[in-house]
Image (cartoon, helix red, strand yellow):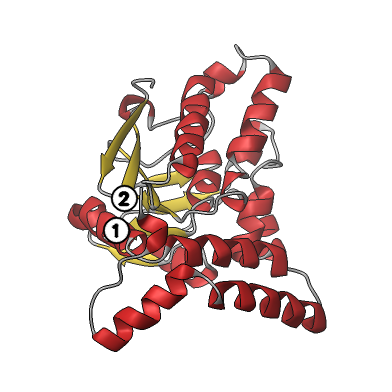
């Protein structure tokens, strides 16, 4: 794995740490490839229950490395970005991003590919591509999914920086922690997710992606299908048994 990305495992947690602090963790092609490889590997590893994406240095990620962009084939870079900035929609394991300092342009898109965004008090966000003559084409869908199409359009047009208070209000940030406790608290939140039923998480995230946009009748039909599958699962039986016996569940889906 590239030194631009550090990978470590803590129980069922896989931590992916952006490691270009001298470049504000800007996303060059090498880092994008390393991230994709690491996320794919974590997604396919049955021993991994949650992915935590964080960053070294004062900033989470300043977006695309503009110098590298002129040295990389445009079509190759576009394909790489399209896959990276949509990977959250394909994940069936939870991903948490821990954001300090700036998460701008592609950095915002990367953070929002996680299911939960944890941010420190100094975090700030923005779609700043218009300042360099570019619209945020590739990351626009994931930003719009979080804040709505109209707000995403306004952010892209103005390229203004959003502070933490507004980021919480419009749906970018889910949890706020003190700057010095960001990594510790983000890891705690992630590990709590990893403690849950892997089967329920996978089924739930699949349902969330499929139910979006359905009319009420179709949504109810889909929910019934997933509920029947869940009710018949070994994890559900274990969960009920553990509840009755007042003990911690031993999820069959966690068995290696």
Indicate left or right for 118 with 158 as reference.
Answer: left
Indicate left or right for 222 with 65 as reference.
Answer: right
Residue 155 visible: no
Residue 5 higher or lower than 142, as above or below: above
The image shows residue 132 at horizontal and vertical percentages of 63, 32
The image shows residue 69 at horizontal and vertical percentages of 60, 20
Q: Dot 1, crowdedness within 10 Å: few (<14), some or many (≥20)?
A: many
Residue 152 higher or lower than 13, as above or below: below
Q: Which mark is residue 191?
A: 1
At horizontal 81% and vertical 83% (from top left) the residue drawn is 217
Q: Which mark is residue 58?
A: none
The quadrant holding residue 42 is top left
At horizontal 32% and vertical 63% (from top left) the residue drawn is 195
Separation of marks 2 and 1 at Cα, in angstroms: 7 Å
Residue 159 visible: yes
The image shows residue 45 at horizontal and vertical percentages of 43, 41
At horizontal 38% and vertical 42% (from top left) the residue drawn is 60
Residue that numbered label 2 is attached to:
12
At horizontal 51% and vertical 47% (from top left) the residue drawn is 108
């Amino acid at each position: 794995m590239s030194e631009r990305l550090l990978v470590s495992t803590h129980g069922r947690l896989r931590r992916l740490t952006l490691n270009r602090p001298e470049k504000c963790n800007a996303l060059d092609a090498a880092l994008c490839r390393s991230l994709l490889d690491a996320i794919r590997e974590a997604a396919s590893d049955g021993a991994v229950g949650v992915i935590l994406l964080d960053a070294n240095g004062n900033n989470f990620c300043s977006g695309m490395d503009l110098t590298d962009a002129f040295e990389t084939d445009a079509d190759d870079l576009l394909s790489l970005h399209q896959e990276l900035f949509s990977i959250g929609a394909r994940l069936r394991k939870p991903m948490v991003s821990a954001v300090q300092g700036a998460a701008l342009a592609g950095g915002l898109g990367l953070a929002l590919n996680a299911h939960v965004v944890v941010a420190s008090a100094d975090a700030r966000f923005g779609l700043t591509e218009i300042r360099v003559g570019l619209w945020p084409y590739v990351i626009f869908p994931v930003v719009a999914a979080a804040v709505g199409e109209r707000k995403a359009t306004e952010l892209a047009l103005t390229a203004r920086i959003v502070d933490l208070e507004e980021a919480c209000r419009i749906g970018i940030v889910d949890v706020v922690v003190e700057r010095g406790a960001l990594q510790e608290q983000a890891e705690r939140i992630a590990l709590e997710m990893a403690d849950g039923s892997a089967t329920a998480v996978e089924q739930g995230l699949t349902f969330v992606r499929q139910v979006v946009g359905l009319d009420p009748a179709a949504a109810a039909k889909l929910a019934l299908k997933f509920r029947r599958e869940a009710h018949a699962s070994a994890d559900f039986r274990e969960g009920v048994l553990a509840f009755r016996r007042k003990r911690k569940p031993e999820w069959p889906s966690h068995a290696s």
